[in-house]
Amino acid sequence: MSLVDKAKQAAQVVQQTVVKKAVELAPDSWVPGGKPDPLIGHAHAHIGKPVSRVDGPLKVRGEATFAAEFVHAGMVYASVAFSSVAKGRIATLDTREAEAAPGVALVMTYRNAPRMQPMPLFLTGEKAAGGDNLPVMQDDRIHWNGQPIALVLAETQEQADHAQSLIRVTYAQEPAVTTFAEAKAQGTEPGVFAGQPMKKEIGDAEAALAAAAVKVDAIYRTPRHNHNAIEPHAATVAWNGDELIVHDASQAVVHTAWSLASVFGLEEKQVHVTSPFVGGGFGGKCLWQHQVLAAAASKLVGRPVRISLSREGVFRMIGGRTVTEQRVAIGARADGHFDTIIHTGTAAMSRHNALPEPFIQQTRGAYAANHFKLEVEVAHMDMLANTFMRAPGESVGTFALESAVDELAVALGMDPIELRILNEPKEDPTEGLPFSSRHIVEAWRTGAERFGWAKRDPKPGATREGEWLVGMGCAAATYPYNRMPGGAARITLTRDGHARVEIAAHEMGMGTATAQTQVTAERLGLELDQVTVVYGDSTLPGLVLAGGSQQTAAIGAAVAAAQHALVAELLKLAGKDSPLAGLKPDEVGGLDGGLAKLDAPERHESYRSLLARAQRDEVTVEANAPPSMEGMHWSMHSYGAMFCEVRVNAITGETRVSRFLGAFDCGRILNPKTATSQFRGGIIMGLGLALMEEAQFDERKGRIMNPSLAEYHVPVHMDVPTIDVIWNDIPDPHTPMGARGIGEIGITGTGAAVANAIYHATGKRIRDLPLTLDKLL
Ligand code: MOS
């Protein structure tokens, strides 16, 4: 039996009696012209309950198996050697000492690596997952400082690391662009993100700015950020003939399987990617060179391989957020109404990726104005491919925009919340679409009340307690609603009334499995312990990315479609004697362990009885989510109002965040416990963005100088105050389940809220992240 077959069996993937349905969905609320979804939020409600994580007990017992914990017989361990120059060729490469070191099974370099295709670059194809599209160890060329030049396999990790240190290499260096200034001087190119030009002009924004009664016009700068999930990237890989199994830490299992198949010239079904648990993924847990190198080396040596990147390895091999320089200018009438908004600038970018940090995204729909000029240009550098990192675009874009709005409020002598509410748009100001649901004003009002905003003396520097200057700031948060195509789910209902849902989705610690257990139980009318959600495996149905804060919507739509298919199938089995006889799928919903007529619930039959009568042990259906058309009809975004109180030490310049509140408008909240955690996690990452995170890039060498958590600072417990999180729980009528994304919004607005609070505390306006003490002295 092949590895893939064994794994399939282990995952208990049920293939028999699968009824495949195309798109044939109940008139759910997000279908244009449809009516509200009757199966969500009805009497049985699991949705909205603070259910604890279903995977929690496994994790605290240490029984959750992560990528670097899978064991295969005969497995060897990998260690990677990195280039120390940014561009050129390998001149000499001496691996003899490494090969002779104890325990070494293989030293792989460009000389002996198998021939492979480049990784399909993320966003350039529906299943592309690659962080870059460079050749992976195929020639002697160096493209960035930190590129893998050799991979050592040995019997233990320590032996591999030691042998790797014995590799001798020299380079023929070539001139590299390693300063942002030089990159800009060489000429910029227009940014294109997911096929959409990062450019929008309405009216004559510059002329309107020149004529504005009150204006701000400033440059904001944000640094590089590296991914630092608690679990460094890792994979355990094994070949069985031409079949490859990869135990990965992934937010895109199907994308990764397809992309690896493309790299090795295999059929998609010959690659099996599992990822049952992930120790955090923020856009960086996709396909990078380490999985490819591990699979290539495993093929050469004929043994399974575990590759577990060191923290330094993550900095060298896994892209992060790139540097940006943004101009924001707002021209307003004397009464505060915006007339013109300009948000332009440049992001650094490698030539090997598809992400021009899209920092104008939030500005498209934030405020009403008559004139707009929005544009992202890119300046190319010879560096590790930059990539997605929690709210790419919005996290740094809201820092610039929401700082500028605060500066304008100061110039106008207006309260910054009132200024924002005054400029609230009636429809999307640049797309002309109606908002699906936008209640940010309510978030501002309830947040301000709870935070005690009214007590704030608008004068900067007015509050001092000993050495500490105290200030309050605020900023808007926002992140778009997305639902990507490809969602599909399989539901197996057994005669004991248990449902298993299978979908190639991802649990990265955010509570997906828990929320989807609630959603499925709600739809089927079951208790939570009667539902099992199976995910994290590329052989399961669906193409679902845990990214863009869209996974919950993608899964929810697929589960809704599968539930509808299940109802249709059960009604076919029901027969004439059933209380459900003659009913159509649209008239029926799940209730009390069975099906009932929605408007006459006494017409009810249990699943147990339905299956028993049909003499079936189980029924399995599979369905695709309906096409994601909602974004064509409405401008859809999650919103938040962020409030921050800081204490800045007048002597040392040190900033302590003393209070933080996020008031959110993100549609229906499916699980308040996991949602609170998501919001807080985003805000904490935002505090890091505001005050400390910066990948120090040596512009002479193009090398990251602080590749460790000792020198690259993220917030620790002492840096984080109690974070208050509230939401309005207003369902969005145009999304599955009424929910919008909550995964990324917490990091947006947070940087500006901190900067604006620092301004209020000190009178100093810092436009350059991170807001470190040297800038405040
Ligand atoms: Mo997020 S950057 O879409 O994982």
Image (spheres, grey):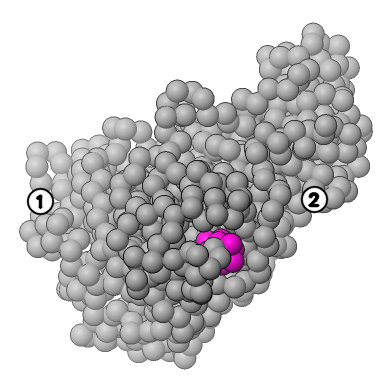
Q: Quadrant of the C terminus?
A: top left
Nearer-the-camera pick, 218 or 52: 52
Q: Separation of disc 1 and disc 2 at Cα? A: 63 Å
Which of discs 1 and 2 lies nearer the camera? The answer is 2
Q: Tell me the number on the disc at residue 268.
A: 2
**On screen, residue 355 above or below 772:** below
Q: Is residue 566 magenta?
A: yes
Left or right: where does residue 193 sit relative to residue 592?
Answer: right
- Mark 1 residue type: Thr
Q: Residue at x 7, y 59 (%)?
A: 455
- Majority secondary structure of magenta residues: helix
Q: Tell me the number on the disc at residue 463.
A: 1
Q: Earlier in the sequence, mark 1 or mark 2?
A: 2
Q: Is residue 438 magenta?
A: no
Left or right: where does residue 87 sit relative to residue 29?
Answer: right
Location of residue 699 in the rendering, given as x and y in whole percent from the top left corner: 61, 45
Q: Residue at x 73, y 22 (%)?
A: 72
Left or right: where does residue 670 sit relative to residue 337?
Answer: right
Q: Residue at x 59, y 55 (%)?
A: 614
